[in-house]
Image (cartoon, rainbow, N blue to C red):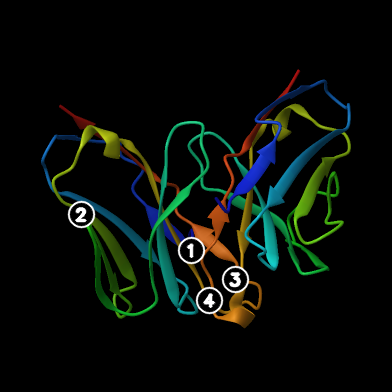
Amino acid sequence: DAMVIQNPRYQVTQFGKPVTLSCSQTLNHNVMYWYQQKSSQAPKLLFHYYDKDFNNEADTPDNFQSRRPNTSFCFLDIRSPGLGDAAMYLCATSRGPSRGSHEQFFGPGTRLTVL
Amino acid sequence: QKEVEQDPGPLSVPEGAIVSLNCTYSNSAFQYFMWYRQYSRKGPELLMYTYSSGNKEDGRFTAQVDKSSKYISLFIRDSQPSDSATYLCAMGGGTSYGKLTFGQGTILTVHP
């Protein structure tokens, strides 16, 4: 089945210790998004890759970085996690508006705990 | 003012009830609208997608969009306990990369 996969599902890190979250997709979609979702809040877009083009949202902290080495994989790097970065991190994919598609398909999420 | 407003609930209904979930928005650039269902500690699952005013039906679910009033709704008929989840409205338009703006989500519980 075509899908969006996130690893790990649960990640515990220490304050200030870098952490990397992984997303892979078998949908061959052009756009990959990273969202942060805190408890009882709406998902908040951090950044996206449209093919190889990377775009930050204006209010995404510099502490968050992303890499997309190929079409299938995208990584979220948090350089120095703070207590406020504890959240669910969601990866989503889309074929993209240039291909007439706006639907986004989400992975199961990675729940990050910062001690 | 938030771009998308959604009543967080919680909403509790008996099995078999008709459920109505609603969102209002302020951004006239929004052209397409989605509803997602999110179970606890899981990722959102796309339920409905529409881009025109009017109704769209899929099984027990009906999505309704009124662009003139900037108001969207999701109706669930014959609700089941398995429908218990958080329902997120999402909408977009005016960007080249398909950015979605989400509502806060409504927590729904359907009790047997």
Q: Which mark is residue B60?
A: 2
| Above or below B80: residue A54 | below
Same chain for labels 4 and 1? Say yes or no.
yes
Same chain for labels 1 and 2? Say yes or no.
yes
- Which chain hosts label 1? B
Tell me the kind of residue under disc 2: Arg
Q: Residue at x 53, y 76 (%)?
A: B93
Q: Which mark is residue B98?
A: 3
| Residue contact between numbered discs 4 and 1, judged by CB atoms under 8 Å | no
- Which chain hosts label 4? B
Instruction: Give coordinates of residue A27: x percent, y percent.
Output: 62, 60
State the CA–CA distance, disc 2 to disc 3.
Answer: 27 Å
Q: Which mark is residue B93?
A: 4
Tell me the kind of residue under disc 4: Gly
Q: Residue at x 29, y 71 (%)?
A: B65
Residue B6 vs residue A27, the one in the foreground: A27
Answer with mark 2 or mark 3, whichever residue precedes in sequence: 2
- Quarter of the image with the C terminus of chain A is top right
Q: Which mark is residue B3?
A: 1
Instruction: Give coordinates of residue A51: x percent, y percent.
Output: 77, 69
Instruction: Give coordinates of residue B44: x percent, y percent.
Output: 49, 47
State the CA–CA distance, disc 2 to disc 4.
Answer: 27 Å
